[in-house]
Image (cartoon, rainbow, N blue to C red):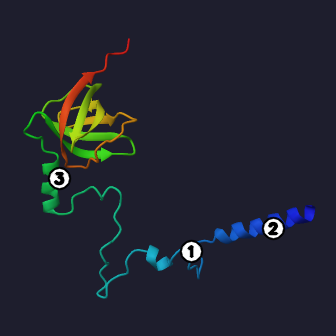
Amino acid sequence: MQRSLLILSVSFLLTACEGMRSPWASGSSDTGTVAAATPAADKADGAPAAPTTRFSWEKDAPATPVAKAEAAKASEVPKDANKARIVSIREEFGLIALVRADKPEPKTRLLLTKENKGVQVEVVRSDDKMIIVGIIPNQLNVPKLQAGDEVTCGVMASTPAAQ
């Protein structure tokens, strides 16, 4: 019994050590080469090459003047009072930023409708520039919303204040 436990533990140790190889070790081919992880090599004339890596804070920044114009249009308030334009969506937190002609008070429930499908949301914060709403959980058959979409926005009801 002790012998089989010893063999089992040694085989487990060898297997675990094999899986933990360093990506910087020479000759490591299972995780890629080190040259692929380093910045781009210098050009022939000695000038550094343009970096190809984009950071998290750069992904949202418009790269061209056309993209800047589209971003400005996406945050533009719709002319119809019953419409709202989605500025951004944070699905991991269940939040949507939108712009609308009138600014509802916090705790007001809204119904965002797109393609005959609706999603109920509750206003978290409202200021002069945009409205932040939280998606009410456990809803079925909700539309797929994207930044820049113009949706129908109706006020449902206000939640009574806690006493």
Could you tell whether 115 is left or right of 162 in the image?
left
Residue 72 in picture, x, y percent from top left: 14, 50
User: What whole-number distance in Å separates the C-alpha atoms at marks 1 and 2?
Assistant: 26 Å
Tell me the mark number nearer the camera, choosing from 1 and 2: 2
For the C terminus, the quadrant is top left
Kindly indicate the quadrant of the structure image that contains residue 127: top left
Residue at which label 3 appears: 71
Label ID, residue 10: 2
Kindly indicate the quadrant of the structure image that contains residue 122: top left
Residue for point 91% across, 65% down: 3
User: Which three-letter amino acid code belongs to the residue tagged 2?
Assistant: Val
Q: Nearer the viewer, residue 115 or 146?
A: 115
Residue for point 35% across, 82% down: 42
Against 55, residue 133 (above or below) is above
Q: Residues within 10 Å of mark 1 (few under 14, many from 20)?
A: few
Against 3, residue 82 (above or below) is above
Residue for point 27% across, 27% down: 109
User: What whole-number distance in Å separates the C-alpha atoms at marks 1 and 3?
Assistant: 41 Å
Tell me the mark number nearer the camera, choosing from 1 and 3: 3
User: What whole-number distance in Å separates the C-alpha atoms at marks 2 and 3?
Assistant: 59 Å
Residue at which label 1 appears: 24
Q: Residues within 10 Å of mark 3 (few under 14, many from 20)?
A: some
Q: Does label 1 or label 2 sit earlier along the sequence?
A: 2
Which secondary structure, mark 3?
A: helix
Q: Does label 2 or label 3 sit earlier along the sequence?
A: 2
Q: Nearer the viewer, residue 115 or 9?
A: 115
Residue 66 in picture, x, y percent from top left: 13, 61
Which secondary structure, mark 2?
A: helix
Residue 75 in picture, x, y percent from top left: 16, 45
Q: Nearer the viewer, residue 71 or 78?
A: 78
